[in-house]
Image (spheres, rainbow, N blue to C red):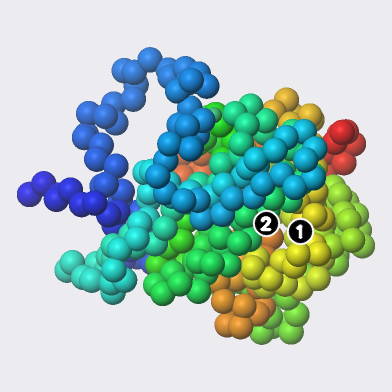
């Protein structure tokens, strides 16, 4: 029997690993649409076809809109958050999990939003301080307003830069997905930090940060409140992690007074990648405790993963990634890259 097409995606749990996957039937692809080999490589769409240029024609009111206040180079909006037109998770009545034989599944209830930066060709390293603060503030505001919603278990903020990193449109934008389960990677790191806390009585992230600040081998940058470093066990070449220096479990706890320092720290590291590695594609995302009381042992952070290699048989078969540069050498290189 063919699978019935639904308007909402479906979450299915792997019976062995417990990991979740999303089957986005709502995107309505027919099997032959997956025959990508036969298709010519898509060219980057011109600005005249950019859906983010005609934002004013969209009927819905943005969830947030931040304008230029300082009247520097521009006026009007600098960033808006709007619903994603092709959501992986969408608003629907909160439902519980159901069963098919031994398997567990659920509707993809939640939300999927896009943060759109105003200019088609001005990327994060090009933003001025106010625009950058507006972007991080927009992440935080949408995060805060969705994290406690009924049937939302986790809210992920992420950004794809470059086609190889999955950015389907060249216009700079970030995304947010609120979902009804805690995703596998986050569950694993929540469990790991909880275990460390029980064994050592401290936060594993605070422990790492303090050690890194002491030995300085993998530190790329720091300011009063944040530190950027290459993780000891970096998953990919030039992986960068940004963490608050004080223990803070949840991204929503980021205070107004720290917005500018967080924004600057993020922008500087993305500028280092662009200037030092000739504008590589990358993804970054925010990992946070879904519940700061239950997961007080966790410590939110931003992970930046340049797309320097693709997962091949070994990586797929083992989950182990091979990085072709030592994190210490990557940090030494990035530290020297000019950010202005
Ligand atoms: Zn555009
Ligand atoms: Zn901590």
* Percent coordinates x, y for residue 88 in the rendering: 37, 50
At a point 80% along the width and 50% down the height, the residue shown is 265
For the point 72% across and 72% down, the residue is: 248
Question: Label 1's element?
Answer: helix
Q: What label does residue 137 carry, if any?
A: 2
Q: Is mark 2 within 8 Å of ligand 1?
A: no
State the separation of the CA atoms marked 1 and 2.
7 Å
Other residues around mark 1 within 10 Å, as few (<14) / some (14–19) / many (≥20): some
Q: Which mark is residue 159?
A: none
Snapshot quadrant of residue 137:
bottom right
Relative to 72, is 214 above or below? below
Q: Is residue 96 visible?
A: yes
* Residue 90 horizontal/vertical position (percent): 35, 56
N-terminal-most mark, 1 or 2? 2
Q: Nearer the viewer, residue 134 or 200?
A: 134
Q: Residue at x 63, y 61 (%)?
A: 140
Which residue sits furthest left? 1
Q: Is residue 40 above or below residue 24?
A: above
- State the mark number for residue 259: 1
Q: What is the x, y in percent for residue 293?
A: 61, 83
Task: Work out whether residue 186 can be spotted.
Answer: no
Secondary element at image label 2: helix
């Amino acid at each position: 029997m063919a699978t019935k097409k639904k308007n909402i995606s479906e979450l299915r749990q792997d019976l062995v690993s417990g990991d979740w996957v999303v089957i986005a039937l709502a995107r309505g692809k027919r099997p032959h649409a997956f025959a990508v080999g036969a298709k010519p490589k898509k060219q980057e769409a011109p600005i005249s076809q950019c859906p983010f240029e005609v934002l004013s024609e969209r009927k819905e009111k943005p969830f947030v809109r931040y304008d230029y206040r300082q009247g520097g180079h521009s006026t009007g909006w600098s960033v808006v958050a709007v619903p994603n037109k092709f959501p992986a998770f969408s608003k629907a009545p909160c439902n519980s999990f159901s069963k098919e034989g031994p398997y567990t599944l659920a509707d993809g209830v939640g939300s999927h939003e896009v943060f759109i930066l105003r200019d088609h060709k001005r990327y994060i390293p090009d933003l001025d301080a106010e625009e950058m603060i507006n972007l991080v503030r927009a992440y935080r505001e949408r995060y805060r307003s969705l994290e406690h919603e009924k049937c939302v278990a986790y809210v992920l903020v992420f950004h794809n830069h470059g086609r190889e990193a999955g950015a389907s449109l060249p216009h700079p934008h970030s995304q947010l997905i609120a979902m009804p389960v805690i995703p596998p990677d986050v569950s694993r790191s929540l469990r790991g930090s909880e275990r460390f806390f029980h064994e050592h009585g401290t936060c594993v992230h605070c422990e790492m940060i303090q050690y890194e600040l002491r030995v300085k081998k993998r530190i790329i940058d720091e300011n009063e409140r944040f530190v950027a470093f290459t993780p000891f066990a970096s998953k990919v070449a030039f992986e960068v992690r940004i963490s608050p220096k004080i223990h803070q479990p949840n991204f929503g706890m980021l205070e107004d007074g720290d917005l500018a320092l967080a924004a600057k720290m993020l922008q500087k590291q993305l500028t280092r990648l662009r200037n030092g590695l000739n504008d590589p594609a990358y993804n970054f995302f925010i990992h946070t405790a879904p519940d700061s009381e239950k997961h007080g042992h966790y410590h939110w952070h931003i992970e930046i993963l340049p797309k320097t290699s693709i997962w091949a048989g070994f990586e797929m078969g083992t989950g182990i990634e091979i990085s072709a540069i030592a994190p210490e050498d990557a940090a030494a290189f990035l530290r020297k890259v000019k950010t202005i």
